[in-house]
Image (cartoon, rainbow, N blue to C red):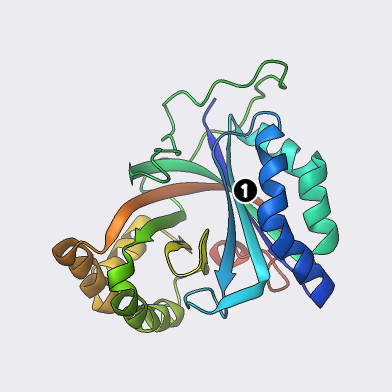
């Protein structure tokens, strides 16, 4: 069985629902570790627009988690009361299920994602047994997702966020991007970017050009980050909608 990563997004409307979601950034920390079979997890907020901005968006929140396999991930997210409460309060939600192809770096001192072929975390005693699941697509074939996570050094915050609008405009204008969002654990200091591409070649071409390539050089030359992680995933499946439809429909069409 291969580890599965889930990334769930929730969009909230009325002020009461947004205040509830903000409060859950603290309260859900008590419930998430108790969910059977869950491994690494993170609660994230977002920025306005598509998230690539330092201005917080009170409407959109995300939960990232790792699981022993896809069947367990889908079952827990579909049936556990915590995820049910999020879906009941949100007016739209979307979850994508991923299989890690490659990863380097750390997140909170851990390397949470395990490429297919490595054993997943051992399930907790009394948890549901492994179930069969389809194998992940071979690396280099089919659509891929990219996730970057960084802890930004406070002294370079102005330079970092000064580059983000150019990168955001560039990725927004790229017709190949099926989905993109910026999220984070702590506003301004902890930044996560997540995007979905039709294949690795298209994703790599974007990374090598324009403002994104310049930002990568600055990260290396000037040491912008205290901690960083880069991961690439195969896409297994999804559930729910975002902006009225599954973002994966763009890849299927």
Residue 22 point in image, percent of width and height: 70, 64
- Residue 195 appears left or right of 96: left
Query: Can you tell which quarter of the image residue 40 is in?
Result: top right
25 vs 141, nearest the viewer: 25
19 vs 162, nearest the viewer: 19
Instruction: Assign a secondary structure to mark 1.
Output: strand
- The answer to whether one can see residue 239 in this image is no
Residue 146 point in image, percent of width and height: 42, 56
Query: Can you tell which quarter of the image residue 160 is in?
Result: bottom left
Residue 93 point in image, percent of width and height: 73, 61
For disc 1, the marked residue is 237
Query: In the image, is residue 24 above or below residue 139?
Result: below
- Residue 111 appears left or right of 120: left
How crowded is the residue under tag 1: few (<14 C-alpha within 10 Å), some, or many (20+)? Answer: some
Query: Could you tell me which residue is drawn at 75 percent across and 36 percent down?
Result: 75
Query: In the image, is residue 36 above or below residue 77?
Result: above
Q: Residue furthest top?
A: 125
Query: In the image, is residue 66 above or below residue 21?
Result: above
Query: Could you tell me which residue is drawn at 83 percent across and 72 percent down?
Result: 16
Query: In the image, is residue 161 above or below residue 205?
Result: below
- The answer to whether one can see residue 27 in this image is yes
Image quarter where the N terminus lies is: top right
């Amino acid at each position: 069985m291969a580890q599965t990563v889930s990334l769930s997004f929730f969009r909230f409307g009325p002020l009461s629902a947004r205040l509830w979601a903000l409060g859950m950034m603290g309260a859900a920390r008590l419930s998430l570790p108790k969910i059977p079979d869950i491994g690494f997890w993170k609660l994230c907020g977002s920025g306005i627009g598509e998230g690539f901005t330092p201005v917080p968006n009170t409407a959109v929140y995300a939960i990232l988690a790792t699981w022993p396999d896809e069947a367990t991930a889908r079952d827990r997210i579909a049936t556990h009361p915590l995820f049910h409460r999020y879906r009941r309060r949100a007016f739209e939600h979307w979850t994508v299920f991923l299989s890690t192809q490659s990863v380097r770096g750390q997140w909170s001192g851990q390397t949470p994602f395990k490429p297919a072929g490595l054993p997943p975390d051992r399930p907790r005693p009394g948890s549901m047994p492994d179930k069969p699941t389809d194998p992940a697509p071979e690396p280099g074939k089919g659509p891929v997702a990219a996730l970057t996570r960084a802890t930004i050094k406070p002294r370079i915050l102005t330079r970092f966020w000064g580059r983000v609008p150019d990168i955001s405009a560039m990725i927004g204008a790229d017709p190949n991007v099926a989905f993109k969002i910026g999220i984070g654990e702590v506003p301004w200091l902890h930044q996560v970017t997540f995007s979905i591409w039709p294949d690795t070649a298209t994703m790599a071409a974007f990374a090598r050009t324009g403002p994104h390539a310049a930002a990568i050089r600055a990260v290396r030359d000037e040491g912008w980050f205290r901690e960083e992680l880069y991961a690439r995933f195969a896409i297994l499946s999804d559930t729910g909608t975002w902006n009225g439809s599954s973002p994966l429909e763009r890849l299927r069409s």
